[in-house]
Image (cartoon, rainbow, N blue to C red):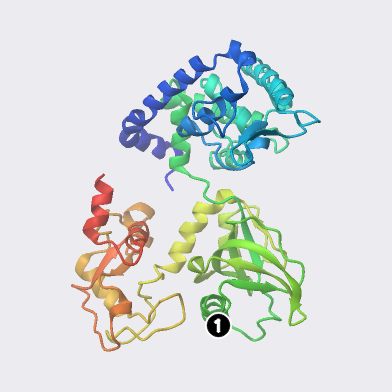
Amino acid sequence: MKNIDEAIKEFFKNKYFDLRKEIEPIVLLRQEFVKRFPKNQIHNMQLDDYVVGKEKESFCYWLETTLRPLGSIKGGSPADKKFGVYYSKDNDEYRTISKWDKSENPDIAFTNIKLEISNLLLAGKNKEIDKIIDNEISPMFKYKILTTYYPEKYLSVFSEPHVDYFLKRLKISYDVKLHVEEKRLLLLSYKNSITEFKDKDNYYFTAFLYQWSNPKVKEIRLLPMSKEEFLDWTIEEVQNDYLLDELINENDGYFNYAEKGMSSIKGALILFQFDNHVIGCAKLLEVIKHKEPIDDIYKGAYVFDTSSIKTFEPINTDEMKNIDDSFKTFSQVKQYLDPVCYEDLMVLIQLKSDGMITEEIPEDETGKYPEASKKQITINAYERNPKARQDCIRIHGSSCVVCGFDSGKVFGDEFEGKIHVHHKKPLHELDDEYEVDPKEDLIPVCPNCHMIIHSKSGGTYTIEEVKEFLSK
């Protein structure tokens, strides 16, 4: 990842002016919203002018949907908790929660909500942080209101994990006991200390942050794999025979646990730990409990997205410490890693993988060019030949033929030649006697372009199609 100074220069050189074209029309919509719902008239707002579920011109609809490009509050809490009151089309009635009226009367609740919004806007105008913190409007909705009415005073990073992520990425020291509202002010202060951003709308700095270092995962966990469960297994056997074969093809992504399972969120990145190394990773879909223990042992299971399961050259303790300086050592504890480490971790995993994904050729295998005997190492993966890979790079070079990415130029000389090799013809169409021609059949592509090539439902995109995507 580029350092912050380089990233800022690139942002203003290559992205700022295009972004202005996108943001300026939305800023005009923000101004229209403020005219529709002036601060001094909130107390006169009618229920239908407020709720989602009825009119697309309502206060809540505008903030959640129309002005979504200026900061998303979509999803998360249900409408009654997020907005306090909403209209249910299915039941043809207004609904609220006891927080706003113990009898759950929508009209009374709405009166209380309007008063609280008015109080919030007054506190927001005067930057009275304690009053903003104590205000009863739901957290993300509260801050969307503030950034919409006072875009020069508040920053549209709504999720607290994202606020923490950016503070750590920017190496801004802070007291962990600070309230999220106070931490947002630290981000805003940092923004105003940067010459290029100081006089720019806060929306541009928010856009820059998410382009520079997007917090893709909220949780990273280490999952120790019991040596008793895999007695006398080598790392390679656990990787190839269990993770990339049994877990995918026999268990359909269900990884059974015997004792108390870890509590983890959907979408968490799970790192498989074995013999004091990280040997693989996968995306968690859910954690389930079995109604009755399986084989009188297994009480539940972690369910993984089978398409996300991958292995790589084992990552050792020192490498983990370099990724997350809070990491001390491997243990049987299901440890957390700081999500801020995600991108650095992905770079390391990619380098450790050395391009070993579906349709790739490992560099450590031997043989001639026949290459279609199937293995259960990854889904639909095949035995590969290193000489074909080497010849492909010798003929075509090690830069991506789609976007021109060169890992040596970006990451340094030691990473020169790190590139994926793509088979133009899908290998599942080849018979066992097929001999690959590295000049005609193989081309070098970067991981991102390779992913796009293989993202077409029922097939693959051509190189020309992917180039066309980039030119849009």
Left or right of 338? Residue 435 is left
- What SS does tag 1 mark? helix
| Residue beneath disc 1 | 237
Q: Quadrant of residue 406?
A: bottom left
Residue 180 shows in the view = no
Farthest residue to the bottom: give it.
433
Horizontal and vertical percent position of residue 175: 70, 35
Left or right of 365? Residue 188 is right
Left or right of 408? Residue 244 is right
Farthest residue to the top: give it.
40
Q: Quadrant of residue 98?
A: top right
The C terminus - image quarter: top left
Farthest residue to the front: give it.
92
Amino acid type at circle 1 is Glu
Q: Name the residue at 22% across, 70% down.
A: 394
Residue in the foreground of this view, choosing between 373 and 419:
373
Horizontal and vertical percent position of residue 168: 58, 42
Residue in the foreground of this view, choosing between 26 and 3:
26
Horizontal and vertical percent position of residue 108: 74, 23
Q: Quadrant of residue 157?
A: top right
